[in-house]
Image: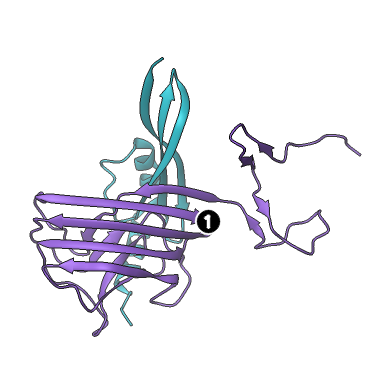
Amino acid sequence: MSLTKQTVTDKIEIVGPYNHIQVREAIQVLEDGQVISQSYHRYVVSPLDDTADKDPKVQAVAAAVHTQEVKDAYQAHLAAQEVA
Amino acid sequence: MSNARTLASTINSSSQIVVPSGGVNFGTGTDGTGTVAGGVLDDYEEGTWTPQITRATSNPSGTPSSSEALGSYTKIGGMVHVRGKVGFNGFSGGSGQWRCSLPFTHSNYGIQYNTLVSGLHKGRVYMDGDSSDRQFRIFPGNNFFNLIILSTLNYYTSDTTFLIWEFSGTYLIQG
């Protein structure tokens, strides 16, 4: 019997008008290659975030959906948010 | 008429009801063939995320002498409840609004502030001894919350070398 632990990106969602990328990681414990326990960990990548340390799959999605147009629109969206 | 059947749900060895897809329909008044919009619970999830403190213009530099960042969430349909704590000692520099990351992006609908099912509760904000007159807010379409000065309704932008934020709250997420 051998126990191992691995983290896999198991869900990538693109949401909202600024193409935020919602990423779910599954943290899995395996016994002889079979998943016996699993928990989730999440993060969100906005159009202005650096993805250098992210999963290559997430980097590829970000490169596709975070165009300069989307980045500019999101930047304008943030700049327009005033406390009231 | 076909006799084909599809597996709707099962009960597993842990006595849990497993719904493969489609969710649980709480709709009433249907004839059993349709679905009432808004009456289906199609997602439930629990997990963690790492609350990350950033600043809008430039982030603090250096390695904190101590830090902790713990966050957990419960997602029920289109709503998520978060609770967490983040603390740092040894910040230097940076400028702009203070922000903290969230596990899901806030809905793009709602008014400009307090667009939450219930506001993010400020359990504690401690920044260089300053713990009063602060509020957390999530703005529509963002994947973070801000620290606000309640009495002046401005973003908190002062520098600090030490902070503790504790928070909990519920907000609507992007569908």
**Chain B rendered in what hue?**
purple
Residue A61: percent from the left, percent from the top? 40, 44
Q: What's the residue at 69%, 40% (across, down)?
A: B9
Location of mark 1 (residue): B76
B66 shown above or below B175: above
Seen at 49% across and 48% down, the residue is B45
Front-lying residue, B152 or A17: B152
Chain shaded cyan: A
- Rendered residue at 41%/69% (across/down): B140
Q: Position of residue B73 (x, y in %)?
A: 41, 53
Residue B167 in the figure: left or right of residue B24: left
Q: Does residue B121 appear anywhere in the picture? A: yes
Q: Nearer the viewer, residue B68 or B113?
A: B68
Tell me which amino acid carries mark 1: Ile
The image quadrant where one finds the N terminus of chain B is top right
Residue B168 image offset from top left, x and y in percent: 36, 63
